[in-house]
């Protein structure tokens, strides 16, 4: 069954919990958090989140809301003259 794409998945929510509980090394957490920051910069992903945020815990919703509030302009796919 295909999954609905979004800014995060259950694994990311679980990793957030593990990191906050001190069970996940900060270096690993950074490698998980950086792509979330990139993905959440896109308005379409932000719109998706508003319709699906109820799937996640309040703690994770607060985390994602903070990420969206501080999101910069999207550049993950070469926007604004960035090439890969």
Image (cartoon, rainbow, N blue to C red):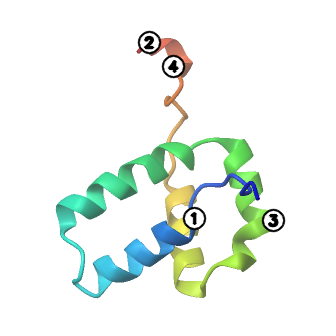
Choose the circle earlier in sequence order: 3 or 1. Answer: 1
Label 4's element? Answer: loop
User: How far is disc 3 from disc 1 in space, using C-alphas?
Assistant: 14 Å
Give the number of the mark in front: 1 or 2. 1
Between discs 1 and 2, the one toward the N terminus:
1
Q: Position of residue 37 (x, y in %)?
A: 46, 50
Identify the element where label 2 is drawn.
loop
Alpha-carbon span between mark 1 and mark 2: 28 Å
Q: Is residue 69 above or below residue 34?
A: below
If the image is split into quadrants, where does the C terminus sit?
Answer: top left
Q: Earlier in the sequence, mark 3 or mark 4?
A: 3
Residue sitting farthest toward the right? 51
- Where in the figure is residue 40, as x and y percent of width and height? 57, 50
Residue receiving disc 1: 9
Q: Residue at x 47, y 67 (%)?
A: 12
| Residue lying at 39% horizontally and 73% vertically, measured from the top left | 15
Per the model, the C-alpha gap separating discs 3 and 4 is: 27 Å
């Amino acid at each position: 069954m295909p999954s609905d794409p979004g800014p995060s998945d259950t694994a990311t929510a679980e990793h957030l919990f593990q990191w906050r509980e001190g069970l996940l090394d900060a270096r690993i957490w950074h490698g998980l958090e950086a792509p979330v920051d990139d993905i959440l910069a896109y308005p379409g992903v932000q719109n998706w989140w508003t319709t699906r945020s109820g799937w996640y815990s309040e703690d994770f919703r607060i985390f994602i809301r903070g990420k969206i509030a501080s999101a910069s302009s999207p550049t993950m796919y070469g926007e604004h003259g960035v090439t890969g």
